[in-house]
């Protein structure tokens, strides 16, 4: 990893921890605030460790963009959890065969950048 990329990743990591330290839940309830702080810390640790071994500059850049997008969306909406994915028409039909593959392709194309690291449920 290049030193500038490494510096950027470490900066994002520290930014996430600073956000978690000062996070206040929108509801104002102390237990909600604490659970959201724990979620932010746990999610950051999990995703940064998961992508720790990446060496390809393009994939590192995608991860950085995803992290920045998730930070901005979380701060804007005051919600640390990922936002819902909006599926295209016919994205939930339970057909099999070629139509099912086409639906899976539509779902993959509709996945926003801030959810790239999450598996489909």
Image (cartoon, rainbow, N blue to C red):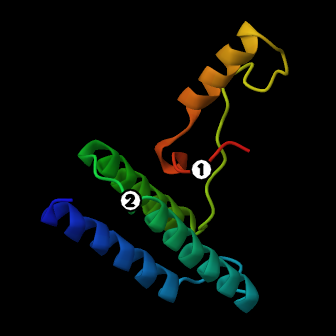
SS assignment at label 1: loop
* Quadrant including the C terminus: top right
- Residue drawn at (50%, 63%) of the image: 47
Q: Where is residue 51 in the image (x, y as percent from the top left)?
A: 42, 58
Name the disc covering residue 68, or none. 2
Q: Where, by quadrant of the figure, is residue 39 drawn?
A: bottom right
Q: Residue furthest right?
A: 94
User: Residue under circle 1?
Assistant: 118
Q: Residue furthest bottom?
A: 30
Q: Where, by quadrant of the figure, is residue 102 drawn?
A: top right
Contact (CB < 8 A) between labels 1 and 2? no
Q: In this view, does 47 lie to the left or right of 86?
A: left
In terms of depth relative to the viewer, which is nearer, 114 or 33? 114
The mark nearer the N terminus, 1 or 2, is 2
Q: Residue furthest top?
A: 98
Q: Is residue 25 visible?
A: no
Q: Alpha-carbon neighbours of circle 2 within 10 Å: few (<14), some, or many (≥20)?
A: some
Q: Which of marks 1 and 2 is in front?
A: 1
In terms of depth relative to the viewer, which is nearer, 48 or 8? 48
- Residue drawn at (46%, 67%) of the image: 49
Q: Where, by quadrant of the figure, is residue 67 drawn?
A: bottom left
SS assignment at label 2: helix
Q: Where is residue 88 in the image (x, y as percent from the top left)?
A: 66, 25
In terms of depth relative to the viewer, which is nearer, 74 or 98? 98
In terms of depth relative to the viewer, which is nearer, 118 or 29? 118
- 106 versus 64 height, above or below: above
- Residue drawn at (41%, 84%) of the image: 18
Q: Can residue 96 be seen in this view?
A: yes
| Count of numbered circles in the view | 2
- Residue drawn at (48%, 59%) of the image: 70
């Amino acid at each position: 990893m290049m030193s500038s990329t490494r510096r950027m990743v470490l900066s994002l990591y520290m930014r996430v921890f600073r956000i978690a330290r000062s996070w206040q839940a929108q509801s104002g309830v102390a237990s909600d605030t604490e659970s959201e702080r724990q979620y932010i810390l746990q999610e950051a640790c999990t995703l940064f460790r998961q992508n720790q071994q990446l060496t390809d500059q393009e994939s590192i850049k995608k991860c950085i963009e995803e992290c920045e997008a998730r930070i901005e969306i979380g701060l804007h909406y005051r919600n640390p959890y990922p936002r819902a994915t909006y599926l295209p028409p016919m994205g939930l039909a339970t057909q099999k065969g070629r139509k099912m593959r086409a639906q899976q392709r539509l779902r993959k194309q509709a996945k926003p950048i801030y959810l790239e690291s999450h598996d489909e449920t």
